[in-house]
Image (cartoon, coloured by chain):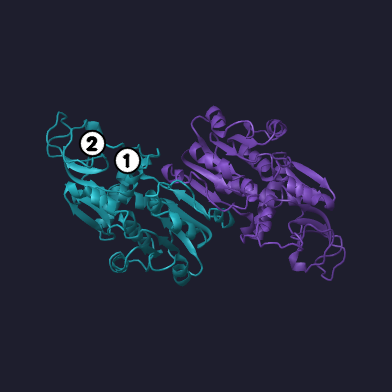
Chain colours: A cyan, B purple
Amino acid sequence: MRNEWMSVDPYMRLVLTGQEGFVPQKRPGEVMDGAAVGIVEASNDPALAPGTAVLSANGWRSRFVARADQLTPLPALDAPLHWHLGLLGLTGVTAFLGIERVLQPQAGETVLISGASGAVGSIAVQLARLRGARVLATCSSPDKARWLIEQAGVDAVMNYRLEKLEDFIAREAPDGLDCYFDNVGGDMLDRSFGLMKPYGRIGLCGAISQYESGDYRSGPANFFAAIEKSLTLRGFNAFLLNPDDSAGIAGWLARQAAQGAIASFETIIEGLENAPAAFAGLFEGGYPGKVVVRI
Amino acid sequence: MRNEWMSVDPYMRLVLTGQEGFVPQKRPGEVMDGAAVGIVEASNDPALAPGTAVLSANGWRSRFVARADQLTPLPALDAPLHWHLGLLGLTGVTAFLGIERVLQPQAGETVLISGASGAVGSIAVQLARLRGARVLATCSSPDKARWLIEQAGVDAVMNYRLEKLEDFIAREAPDGLDCYFDNVGGDMLDRSFGLMKPYGRIGLCGAISQYESGDYRSGPANFFAAIEKSLTLRGFNAFLLNPDDSAGIAGWLARQAAQGAIASFETIIEGLENAPAAFAGLFEGGYPGKVVVRI
């Protein structure tokens, strides 16, 4: 296998915490892994002829040898190869789960999406708007805020380094939030509980703000508000889906993109040698859209 | 108004924490309040003739004067007066919400109910069994454990002072839990996350184990498992229901009781002067079933 593209994702930080969770821990000297798209160079399996484009979990390397059952031929979708790591990969499927299966925001409802300029967030904001919901977003820089309004079509945006969430919501959703799509955990999740309407729904996607500290497992400080307000909190983990379900979702996303209903936003990093910096950058404010490394 | 019965409930502890929440704080010298059932002694409102039995929020007193719109005539259900504080009151409605609207355990599923011998718990276990689910229960004494098996019909019970939850679940539900009805919060809720099946549901009813410490708002230590396992957590608060909805639920519960499908379990404390001790006792292991005070 020759890898052409690899993904860097926030969840990968969890293999470096020394705490077992839903990803096995890596030790110094072991090779990182993660989603990658590559081309079969030589094969003993007639079903995987040389030249076949496949998805694997063997990122962070330029070439590798694998058994055929560890490789997934890419579905025949009219899309660039690297979209299978983003819009049509784990990233897009995760955003889909959060909006279409968990939160299901309706026209007339207001949904807040944190980490909105990131890989999952930039797809989630588009899917929420497609459903007719009003979309509020948080991000970490004026550039991203502008980008979210002009490119991703969000209704209002807050730079969390400049403004308090309570002030933003008081201005943009004075009756409170129907839905919150949480990509960041930590302080933002804590505060969101106080800003939800009764019977509000919170989708739990990730907790990137907590991954660096090592204390990413503990719950929000204002958790009791879930009882007071009859809130629903639902986690979602695309790793748990069966392959047919994931493939169906990817096909739906590809059709939406082909019709121009949603767009893929990406930051492309050139060269495997720059993958560590690309990965570390996710925790330093990140990049707009999905970050992929061209190997 | 002459009060005949009053309720003591764990949530009342929250008016004594000095922290504003869904119940306003009481200061020393103020009168406690809570659900009570009484009889109209004298009235200027023809709709509330002397002798009418009514529900009020004016517990913790033997007599009081109130406006008619603060009193709710009891529905015409064939039930003892004090059931309107328990099975047919906030307690029963809360258990109904947790089982019938939030968790909805199915035949073949396993549901764990903590604080199972308490007011809400003793109704929740019966409703879960009515739906055909396998019911596991936790409690704090051998007497209550026996009572839960023999009277309330649970399938297996654990005394949390003698056994670890992990050992109990490994024995009784080695594949994990489909549902957890959490009446206690704290350590039990923390541990439950690790014992849920993927896509499991947790109903958040209360956190009695945390009310005394004052730190009842903070979330469970193992909250991140909600993402890893795609768990659903839903709080429920019967105070948020509209009166028609509550009345409909109470009517349904009364019909189940009339048919012998569920029973009301109670501990009756005699005398208003014993109400403080009855209330404090809820936090010292509690009593079987609903605790009501005969005034």
Residue B295 in sight here: no
Secondary structure type for disc 2:
loop
Q: Which mark is residue A244?
A: 1
Q: Quadrant of residue B18?
A: bottom right
Name the residue located 44 percent from the left edge and 54 percent from the top edge: A186
Left or right, residue B99 beside residue A157? right
Badge 2 or badge 1: first in the primary sequence: 2
Give the alpha-carbon distance from disc 2 to disc 1, as whole Å.
15 Å
Residue A127: x and y in percent read: 35, 58
Mark 1 falls within which chain? A
Examine the rendered structure and indicate whether residue B138 appears above or below residue A168: above
The residue tagged 2 is: A71
Q: Quadrant of residue A26?
A: top left
Examine the rendered structure and indicate whether residue B203 appears above or below residue B56: above
Residue A12: x and y in percent read: 32, 45
Residue A266: x and y in percent read: 24, 56
Question: Which marked residue is nearer to the observer: mark 2 or mark 1?
Answer: 2
Residue A274 in sight here: yes
Mark 2 falls within which chain? A
Crowdedness near tag 2: few (<14), some (14–19) or many (≥20) residues, C-alpha within 10 Å: some
Q: Quadrant of residue B155?
A: top right
State which quarter of the image contains the N terminus of chain B.
bottom right
Name the residue located 78 percent from the left edge and 53 percent from the top edge: B6
Callout 2 amino acid: Leu
Left or right, residue A67 beside residue A252? left
